[in-house]
Image (spheres, helix red, strand yellow):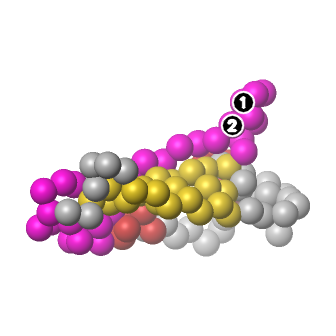
Amino acid sequence: MDSLQKKGEKIIDLHISKDKQDFIHIAISDNGVGRVMADKIKRNKVLKRKSVGIDITKERLANFSKDLQNTFDVEIVDLYDENQEPLGTKVILHIPTV
């Protein structure tokens, strides 16, 4: 394992809710190293590959919601503690239901 990677227990939290505007919100949080450190790790790797996970998800959501009145949204939030140390990342999908 790379010395820059997260040590200890790895946690993923999933929260799903629906609001009065007929959107489903799916929030996925992790306690990883954060996007800044992940980018540093990726730059230091010998084998470079482009991560396309978010782009694929956005494309699938766009296809899913193209016939709906509302549009989807993907929000990415970097999580920090009170000392501005990275605590992980939260990705929130806002998906229309009507």
Q: Amino acid at mark 1?
A: Gln
User: Compared to 64, does 9 lie above or below?
Assistant: above
Q: Quadrant of the C terminus?
A: bottom left
Disc number placed over residue 84 in the picture, else none = 1
Tell me how far mark 2 sits from mark 1, CA to CA. Answer: 5 Å
| Mark 2 vs 1: CB contact within 8 A | yes
Q: Amino acid at mark 2?
A: Tyr
The residue segment tinted magenta is: 58-87
Q: Could you tell me which residue is drawn at 71 percent across and 55 percent down?
A: 32
Label 2: which residue?
80
Q: Residue 73: within the magenta?
A: yes
Q: Could you tell me which residue is drawn at 65 percent across and 68 percent down?
A: 46
Q: Could you tell me which residue is drawn at 78 percent across and 27 percent down?
A: 83
Front in this rendered view, residue 73 or 49: 73
Q: Position of residue 65 (x, y in %)?
A: 21, 65
Residue extending farthest front: 20
Front in this rendered view, residue 33 or 26: 26
Element at label 2: strand
Which quadrant of the figure has residue 29? bottom right
Q: Residue 35: within the magenta?
A: no
